[in-house]
Amino acid sequence: MKIKFTYILIGILYTLALCWFFISYHEEANKNLIFNKDIKDGDIIFRSTATENLEVKDFNEYGIIKKSLGDFYVWDNKSTMKRRLSKWVEKGAHHKVYRIKASESAMTFELLHGTYNHLLHSDALEFIAEKNTPFLNENSDEDVHNSTKTHDISSYIPKGYHLIYFENRPNRVHADLNKDGILDYAVLITDGNRDVGYIDANKVKLAIFEGQEDGTFILKNETGNLTYAFIYRNLDQNIKVSDSNVISIAHQSMRHDYELKFRYQKERNEYMLVGTAYNNYGNAIHKGAENTKTNFISGKRISTINGTKTTIIEDKFISISEVNDNNIYDLIH
């Protein structure tokens, strides 16, 4: 009788072990299939769904990740609907997962100007992972499924935008921008038409595409709308990357020029404005000429108008997404 009981007990334990192994394996497989990162029960996932008034970079939905029997689910922000994580990420172009720090367990999630973007820069959240769904460019003959496998950066340009060309050369640089050992792209894109010399352009942006281990790319960060003058600048002078992985783009007009410098900041997991240079030529005899350089890492601005002057600036580590034509001149001098 004891031997029979022992066999039964061993059988039960063996079955439980197999179940545990299956659930753990299934859980890990599902997790890695989507994010390949250590997501956990209770993490917050933000989703970007473009609307008429919001762009791809705007995160306007979120849910709470829950783990159950070897699978991951997402409860919406009102805990009224539960969906598998793999299905939840099918909607939306960009997804980011964050974890609430223990000291901020009571934090609230409220929309600001229709998005949750402001929360992504909060010290209360710890970045965990992200997923970006490549867009199908209207100039591509590939379907959506095939576009996720292509290594051609043009297939990842957001719909409605095009890579800017200058004298038949694409306005892009190719380098390991985030120092993960995989080459990335920084490109200038516009909604204008190359066939008419971009005269119909309303939007111009600097976009960062990070390379993945399988040779594909994700749209990591982008600026707001910049001036169309970036389209017509000589390519060799317009966009470049330094040995220290600083991406710079330059603008020039009749009376002034400026340069914007961006770099990947690992602690924030995004690209930030780290420096600017501004040159005002003054009038015809250069009266009122000015030279101003700003270092957002050190928080110092040096201006040579009416003698050299150093000032301390309050804003540090400005996200690339916050830079646009409406605030550039406030940022550079």
Image (tube, helix red, strand yellow):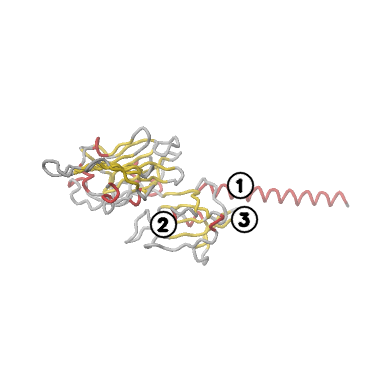
Mark 1, Cα crowd under 10 Å, few <14 / some 14-19 / many 20+, is: some
| Furthest residue in direction right, as rendered | 1
Mark 2, Cα crowd under 10 Å, few <14 / some 14-19 / many 20+, is: some
Q: Is residue 237 visible?
A: yes
Q: Is residue 91 visible?
A: no
Left or right of 5 in this view: 189: left
Q: Amino acid at mark 1?
A: Tyr
Residue 272: x, y in percent? 37, 45
Say which residue appears at 14% left-offset and 43% top-offset: 287
Disc 1 to disc 3, how far (Cα)? 11 Å
Disc 1 to disc 2, how far (Cα)? 36 Å
Front position among marks 3 and 2: 2
Name the residue nearer the viewer: 283 or 4: 283
Residue beneath disc 3: 69
Residue beneath disc 2: 118
Residue beneath disc 1: 25
Precedes in sequence: disc 1 or disc 2: 1
Name the residue nearer the viewer: 255 or 1: 255
Query: Disc 3 vs disc 2: Cβ atoms closer than 8 Å?
Result: no
Residue 19 in the image: above or below residue 185: below
